[in-house]
Image (cartoon, rainbow, N blue to C red):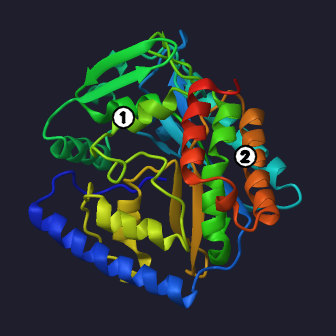
Amino acid sequence: MGQEITSSNFTEADIAEFQRRLIVETRLLESWFKEGVFDSHGDLGGLELEACILNQAGEPAPLNQQLLAGLDDQFVVPELATFNVEINTTPRRLQADALDRMFEELQGIWRECNGQAETLSARMGMVGILPSLRQADLSLENMSPLNRYRALNDQVFKLRRGQPVELHIDGRETLDLCHDDVMLESAATSFQIHLQVAANQAAKLYNLSKIVSAPMVALSANSPYLFGRSLWDETRIPLFEQSIAVGASDLTKRVSFGIRYLYQSMMENFSANLQRYPVLLPRLMDEPVERLAHLRLHNGTIWRWNRPLIGFNEQQQPHLRIEHRVVPAGPTLPDMIANAAFYFGLVTGLAEQYPQPERDMGFIRARSNFYQAARFGLQ
């Protein structure tokens, strides 16, 4: 779930102080990796589904505030656009009937959402990009009324020096357009798969998550259309990468496949966060340094297709997770659970079979496979 902030207005002093705290927290995290303080349990899984609210004509309905008020469910939260919500599930140990229980929980929440939507003369939908979406729907008037979204828009365009986002997608057809805010991002909805990993296996499983991104996106692709154009099999990939473009190179892109595999640990990701990415949301928080509040907020503004995450268990011991973000929402609940099962099984099985998977597939090949699979699917 995204972190809300108290204000969307920041000063240069805020940015400088945030950067100072980010440095302190990054150094602390580095010491944790050296000392081995992380939860040693792996094989926990969790799911996030970004969904659409539709009117009776199948068009986006900007009703998430009304729907959320009626639901009053901590597992259903707003997304960037008022016609989207995010559904979260309980993390579970990946054993026995875990996938059945994930399905039952997701199905139960989905039914509640649909029931509440019906009271608003609406219904829920799940697809990577809504085919009925128009560019006019992606306006600031349809931005959810949260400070973090206003601040994100302001800070992105500050870094862009006010220049509009230029979207160019060359596929079966070609789409070229300009957009004056970050709302293009809300056209893309995902099914995000979380895997908690033991620190001594984290780098291998993270690299494997990159390697399997190609088959994962090829199998799950369901987003061929954007604004009436037939583009990539999974158009969500180039759309999302370009919708928050504030870096001119692979080193600074906020949404990317990355530039290499990990060599030793996930600490390499967080060092890169500090060294390569300007602060977007410099919210200053009064939390103990051990909560890594600023580090985690900063990490949340870098949308790697496989994102490393730091969390805490009930005993407040830190743990490591991989957020696999390449899979689109939909088309059905069974499809998404099957995609999650495939991911969990594929990365853990390959980890057992290949001691050093990076030697069997170089990074450049893995990255090329990913974009080819997003463009052409299973062809």
Residue denoted by label 2:
340
- Location of residue 364 in the rendering, given as x and y in whole percent from the top left corner: 54, 48
The label on residue 332 is none
Judged from this view, the residue extending furthest toward the left is: 12
- Which kind of residue does numbered mark 1 sit on? Gln
- In the rendered structure, the answer to whether residue 342 lies left or right of residue 57 reads right
Lower sequence index among marks 2 and 1: 1
Image: 190 above or below 47: above
Labels 2 & 1 near each other (Cβ < 8 A): no
Instruction: Evaluate whether residue 162 shows in this view.
Output: yes
Q: Residue at x 65, y 77 (%)?
A: 200
Q: Which residue is mark 1?
A: 242
Q: Residues within 10 Å of mark 1 (few under 14, many from 20)?
A: many
Image location of residue 93, percent across then percent down: 77, 64
User: Height in image: 281 above or below 100?
Assistant: below
Q: Secondary structure at mark 1?
A: helix
User: Is 17 positioned to the left or the right of 335 in the image?
Assistant: left
Viewer-side residue, 334 vs 355 = 355
Q: Residue at x 77, y 63 (%)?
A: 354
Location of residue 222 with respect to 56 vertically, above or below:
below
- 30 over 127 or under it: above or below: below
Residue positioned most to the right: 96
Q: Residue 12 sits in which quadrant?
A: bottom left
The residue at 49%/18% (across/down) is 171
Residue 379 occupies quadrant = top right
Asked which secondary structure carries label 2, the reply is helix
Q: Mark 2 is on which residue type?
A: Ala
Q: Horizontal and vertical percent for residue 303?
A: 43, 49
Residue located at (61% from left, 28% from top) = 126
Q: How far apart are labels 2 and 1 at the CA level?
A: 26 Å
